[in-house]
Image (cartoon, coloured by chain):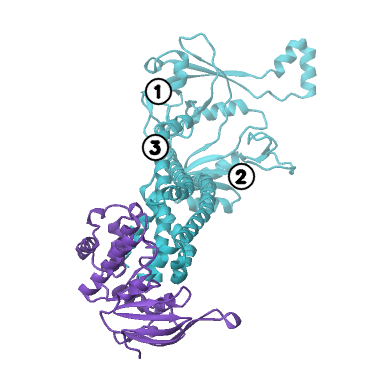
Amino acid sequence: MIEISHITKTYGKKKNAFTALNDVSFTIPDGASVAVVGRSGSGKSTLMHAMSGLDRPEAGEVVIDGNNILTFKQKDVDKFRSNKMAFIFQSFFVQANESCYNNVSLPLEIAQVPTRRRRTKILRALEAVGLTDKAKSRARDLSGGQKQRLAIARAIVNEPTILFADEPTGNLDSVTGMQIEELLFSYNRKHGTTLIIVTHDHEMAKKCDMQIHIKDGKIESIEGGVKS
Amino acid sequence: MRRADIIKRAGRNLRQAKGRTILTSLAIAVGAFTLTAALAAGQGTRDYAAKLLQNNVDPQAIFVVKDKSLFEQGGQTGLREYDPDVSTTATGRPGATLKQMNQQDVEYLESRGDLAQIVPVYTLNPKWVTIEGNDKKYIGSIDYYDATILNETKSGTLPPIGQQIADSDIVLPEKYIETLGITPDNALGKRVKVLFAQQGAQVNQQELQAALMRGGVDEAAKLVKPAEKEFEFVVKAAAKTSTMSFGSTPRMLVSANAAKMINDYQTAGSDAAGKYTGVSAVAKPGKNPDEIKKQLEAKGYAAQTAKDAQALLFTIANTLQGIVVGFGLLTLFASVFGIINTQYISVLERTSQIGLMKALGMSRRSIAALFRYEAAWIGFLGGAIGALVAYTVGTLMNPQISKWLDIGDNAILKFEPLHMIGLIAALVIIAIVAGWFPARKAARLDPIEALRTE
């Protein structure tokens, strides 16, 4: 369970201060699929960064499975993230020069998974996204859709409990986008992984269990969830 | 993240930027090459010097002079007070004067009782040399036989170390025998005659006038004409030209006694009579040459022991090596900036990768380590390339260099594996230090900012 209460994040100082998040609170139950919807600049990305511990709001609590990660030291936040969370980005961020295999291996190395247990996990993840035959290809030789599938394989390889997706279909054509969407939702259903999608695509948002609408750093409305 | 995983990723990252990696490491390779060569040359020179000394110098040997300046700058310069022992020609260096050892000094050394084989430096200037069975007159250098060195022979036999040859013996060098057109075996037992001239008698005005009155110009000429004397020897052995000897310039050798006789004859009646640049001696077994040296210095002499000679040779080798090492270090210093630059660019190019790694939970420490290991790989590569090229080129060039320097089979470049490993290790450390700042920049990168790029 993710409990967000009264988080506020401000950028800049004094006159130039800009409030990206203003007293935001909500609760996400385990295994839910959640869409964070809003226009660009509304604060939805900041919210994702705050929830994942990449960014530190100056006020409020981010409680994940009973732990307020904002009280953690940087090192422990990093460790928590490497064990429990995964990310998918609009522009993929796969390592173009590395092979698909080594791309997927990275989170396991960061989480210090023993070498002998890595291979099966990597191959299983690649299989899940249909890239088994590309294991040795370099990521730069893949198409956009394949790159995003590779990013998904990298995200799911260490079986995270929370999967963040920041505009996962933003750089893809509609057919490929649909395939990626399908992959994410089916993974969410099959493994009970909490899926949090940041998007401005209302079509995709509708498919989620819960929609959090954000405007100017404030929650406009929450559909399907529980407002605390 | 585990170290092994970080090192592997660092290696792969470099392989993906081959051109840049190789160019950066080449800068280090130049420094590594220079240092490897310098270390090898230093080692080779020291080894050669040590070998030379071992073969040439009795560890008990001691060389005594009156004038300390001979060891320091090869004699004194400037005007000095008259002293019959001071010579303007003894050093052979124009402009330098030297206070020489005289007969009393030699007697003092003999009276000490702890020195043996006391032989002053004799200067022998032959006019010409003839050999039995050859009508021609020859001119060559002649010196006295040093009993502290074991000489190799081409033919004939020489006494064991510490013993002089007989006074009628002469040893001819291989090269001289070649010129004479005979074989070393043929030369044995042949009579050799050497003509020596006296250093012109000193005649005063009255003597000269008396001679002119007596017999005219002819009589006077006879008076000033230096006397000449022929000394006869028998060839005892043909000495092999050795690359391991100091006096590798070939010379004819006679016994120390014969040399004394000739020297006395040549200098008789002149200012140079009974005066020597220095005196060589050997401390008797059980006597410490350093102790004797101290006592002699207290008496106003200056002395050099075998150890001093070795130190001097080593100092020369070390100084030369130091200069080259200095240049190598300068090159390395320059290449450090190359690493810093390359790694900074690498950090800037890979901001999104760094951001992603941070998002995936990679710690600052691991990210800094990743970049430091990349720098370490560059250092290792540069060091390995430099050392390997130096080793290959050096090993191929060694015979040629030895030929140029005329030192026989002795290699002047000696590559010590330990030196090379140490050098590469040092370069890896230097590279890590150079990679410190870029690594810190990478570690401090804000992941949110980094992920926004692209």
First-in-chain label (1 vs 3) = 1
First-in-chain label (1 vs 2) = 2
Type of the residue with mark 2: Lys
The residue pinned by badge 3 equals B395
Specify the subunit that label 2 lies on: B
Specify the subunit that label 3 lies on: B
Q: Is residue B344 above or below residue A63?
A: above
> In this rendering, would A46 be left or right of B270?
left
Q: Is residue A14 above or below residue B378?
A: below
CB-based contact (under 8 Å), mark 3 and mark 2: no
The residue pinned by badge 1 equals B237
First-in-chain label (3 vs 2) = 2
- Neighbor class of circle 1 (other Cα within 10 Å; few <14, some 14-19, many 20+) is many
What is the secondary structure assignment of the residue under circle 3?
helix
CA separation in Å, label 1 and label 2? 35 Å
CA separation in Å, label 1 and label 3? 37 Å
What is the secondary structure assignment of the residue under circle 2?
loop
Q: Which chain is cyan?
A: B
Type of the residue with mark 1: Ala
